[in-house]
Amino acid sequence: MGLKEGFLWGGAITANQVEGAWNIDGKGPSVADVATYKPNVDVKDYKKQVGVTSKSIQEALQTDDTKYYPKRHGIDFYHRYPEDIELFGELGFKTLRISIAWSRIFPTGEEAEPNQKGLDFYKRVFREMHKYNIEPLVTLSHYEMPLNLAIKYNGWVDRRVIEMFKRFCDSCFHEFKDDVKYWLTFNEIDSVTRHPFTSAGIIPDKSENLLKDEYQAFHHQFVASALVTKDCHEIIPGSQVGCMLTKLTDYPNSSDPRDVLASFNKNTMNYFAGDVQVFGEYPPLILDFFKKNGLKIKMSAEDLRILKENTVDFVSFSYYMSTVSSYNEGNLELTAGNTVVGGKNPHLKTTDWGWTVDPVGLRISLLQLYDRYHKPLFVVENGMGAKDTLTEDKKIHDDYRIDYFREHFREMIKAVDAGVDLIGYTSWAPIDLVSASTSQMSKRYGFIYVDEDDLGNGSLNRYKKDSFDWYQKVIASNGENL
Ligand code: BG6
């Protein structure tokens, strides 16, 4: 059996972690441009890593510094994309997942017309991909909304943002209708409650009732996602639009039914966004959660109709690690993870950043998602952040990364053999980039090493790691040569 012919192997990156050029060619500041690098931050203190206040945003706006705001310089993909895409071509990529920075196209989000220079940049990038037969997979919102919308509207809490997002997306659909077939609306849409600013432009100190604002923002994103899914289908016949979920697979800490229930509740909350986007309606358990917490979320009958009529074509997700839950959380040893801190599983190893390594969890995740949604799946993020060493002869011997991917691919293929319809797999990330959470460069994910340190020093030269050759063979053999 194995993977189907035409399986979309590739890698995933995002505008704000690679492009740099944060204030060039008309781009406005985005929420990512005020994210700071905090040396010595505790990796388990997730809130501290990504937290902002009105004051920290104002301070950020008063400086052009890029050293402590590393997403402003990224890895200079804005200028080096031909070289990087050539390397992806050499890897044999069938697809590359990128995102379009909203504030490059609509600098404040409020303009009536798009910034042509921003559109032209992505046109050049897509042209370069097509040169190597790389199919673009494009995320419309990946943690980079115009900062103005966060400051002025408290981000997605305000319903008017829906219209502005629609204007941005429609401009992209018209401009790139001949270039892009696969689209994702919101990256890790379920993350609004985990990092409200990065994900939805919500400045916590501006909210009187943060929990209510977060779920109101969720609702507006769902409606926006449904509306642009409809537009995409109309403007680009044959296009495919997916949702993008963070698969935070959780296990009970023991067979104690109370632990099983705690884990069930955690997974249910994690599924809620996918349920809305796939089934087109709010699941009963989340409606009950709203009621119990006194959350009166404004949603009209028209909104509910829009959700029902415009569901997604496929389900994409990130998968990095798993956690365990207990009714007695105090009993658990905690560990860091992708946008979360959770109970540590004693059966699993962890990465340099404390994330558990759980390849079987990927198989479980694929089976769970397929069983629940019966929709084609796409793994659009998976990988490990590690400390790499560049040797004097410019080599990186990253066997640990090869081992990580090999084990995950074995389990992924077993899920496919069990009947899961899987469209493709894009690793996070094929090239080293600035970390979303910690803004570090030293947390390296790539098959390609970028000579740059946490403070932006370095030649920015690209070097192939040992994993580069390995992944190239995996793709060439469509997953047989692991
Ligand atoms: C996902 C994000 O949450 O995880 C990516 O979609 C991010 O943008 C990735 O980079 C890995 O997280 P981090 O914090 O290690 O960069």
Image (tube, helix red, strand yellow):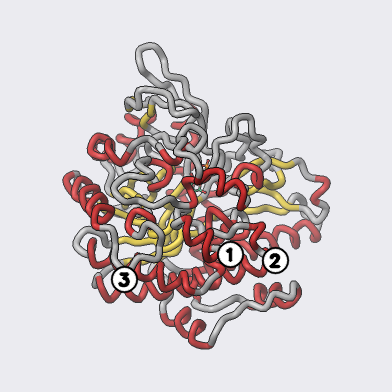
Image quarter of residue 169: bottom left
Is residue 420 shown to the viewer in this render? no
Q: Position of residue 361 (x, y in %)?
A: 57, 49
Task: Give the residue at x 42% y 37%.
Answer: 433
Residue that extends furthest to the bottom in the rendered view of this protein: 301
- The numbered dot on residue 90 is none
Task: Give the residue at x 49% y 77%.
Answer: 280
Q: Position of residue 74 (x, y in %)?
A: 40, 38
Amino acid type, residue under disc 2 in the picture: Glu
Q: Position of residue 165 (x, y in %)?
A: 40, 67
Mark 2 crowdedness (10 Å alpha carbons): few <14, some 14-19, many ≥20: few
Amino acid type, residue under disc 3 in the picture: Cys
Residue that extends furthest to the top in the rendered view of this protein: 392
Amino acid type, residue under disc 1 in the picture: Tyr
Image quarter of residue 266: bottom right
| Sequence-wise first label, 2 or 1 | 2
Mark 3 crowdedness (10 Å alpha carbons): few <14, some 14-19, many ≥20: many
Residue of label 2: 208
Residue of label 3: 232
Q: Secondary structure at mark 2?
A: loop
